[in-house]
Image: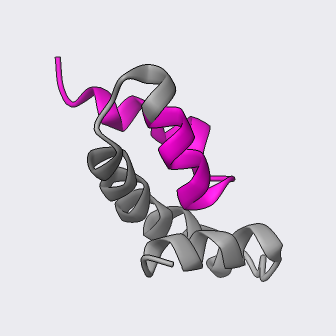
Amino acid sequence: MGDPAFDAVDWVLGGGAARAQETAARLGLDTGRVLAWCRALAVAVAASRLARGRHDTETALLLDLAQGR
């Protein structure tokens, strides 16, 4: 029940858009939906990291993903 593309988010967030495309293809999911979920959740994950003072490479990747880069 629910959107199967949502479940792919945990596998993708650390790797950005390229990983989203690869993961979606392997799982037979719509790449656009996987990316949309990743972008939406990247905002929340990045905000939490920034609130804890984590201004590192992973946070920067999350922010880039959230902005559609």
Query: Does 28 sit above or below residue 20?
Result: above
Mark yes or no: residue 1 visible: yes
Q: Residue furthest right?
A: 56
Main secondary structure found in the magenta portion: helix
Q: Does residue 2 belong to the magenta stretch? A: yes
Q: Position of residue 41 (x, y in %)?
A: 42, 58
In the picture as drawn, the residue positioned furthest to the left comes out as 1
Q: By what rule are the colours in the image chosen?
A: one colour
Q: Quadrant of residue 59?
A: bottom right
Number of callouts in the render?
Answer: 0
At x 67%, y 71%, the residue is 61
Q: At 18% across and 26% down in the image, what residue appears?
A: 2
Please report the residue visible at 65 percent of the width from the left and 80 percent of the height from the top: 50
50 vs 45, left or right, is: right
- Magenta stretch in the rendered image: 1-24
Say which quarter of the image contains residue 57. bottom right
Question: With respect to residue 1, does 44 lie above or below?
Answer: below
Residue 47 appears in the figure: no
Relative image position of residue 58 (x, y in whole percent):
75, 67
Please indicate whether residue 63 sits to the left or right of residue 1 in the image: right
Kindly indicate the quadrant of the structure image that contains residue 35. bottom left
- Observer-nearest of 26 and 3: 26
Vertical side of 54 occupied by 29: above or below:
above
Give the position of the N terminus as an image quadrant.
top left
